[in-house]
Amino acid sequence: MHWSYLILILGLLVSGSAFAQQSGPASEGLFRLNSGTDNCPFEIERSEDCDGFALHPSSDGVARESVRFCQINKGFKVQQKTGQKILSEVVSRDNYVRKQETTIYIDKDNSLSLMQEDTVIQDGPDKFLWEHSRNGRGFSCLYSK
């Protein structure tokens, strides 16, 4: 009877440690800027989020707009809000993840399209390149732990 409890406990410990290694990607945590173009945030907190991950940039202690890479490889997503429609897709291949988002503002007979593209290229668990572009303007930044 005691052996069955011991085997059950050991099984839970082993599967629990395997789950802990698989559940949180090694690329989570705080990353600092190594090099990059103008307007690169000084640091980024990277976390799991919405069937993907999120980047939470900040500079001099001031938070900037977070970028969420949600529902990776699950096709286009359409959000409808008053006066706007947001089309987005997040695709992952090999060592990179790319998010393309188009926001269409609609006002009576006029419409305006704004496009944003973010790409994260992973270089091992402790380093990544983030390229951000909004309407053709942006930055390219290399971060490491």
Image: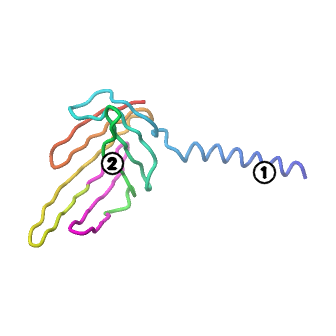
Instruction: Tell me the residue at 29%/45% (across/down).
Output: 119
Towards the viewer: 4 or 35: 35
Q: Quadrant of residue 86?
A: bottom left
Query: Does residue 68 appear left or right of residue 5 in this picture?
Result: left
Q: Which residues are magenta?
A: 77-100
Residue shown at the point (37%, 57%) measured from the top left: 73
Determine which residue is flagged by label 1.
Answer: 8
- Identify residue type, mark 2: Val
* Residue carrying label 2: 67
- What residue type is disc 1 on? Leu
Which quarter of the rendering shows the C terminus?
A: top left
Asked which secondary structure carries label 2, the reply is strand
Residue 144 lies in what quarter of the image? Answer: top left
Q: Is residue 119 above or below residue 38?
A: below
Give the residue furthest to the bottom.
108
Residue at x 37%, y 37% (from the top left corner): 44
- Residue 48 coordinates in the image, percent (x, y): 46, 48
Identity of the residue furthest to the right in this view? 1
Q: Is residue 142 above or below residue 91?
A: above
**34 shown above or below 29:** above
Q: Position of residue 49 (x, y in %)?
A: 44, 51
User: Which residue appears at 26% of the width and 40% of the height?
Assistant: 131
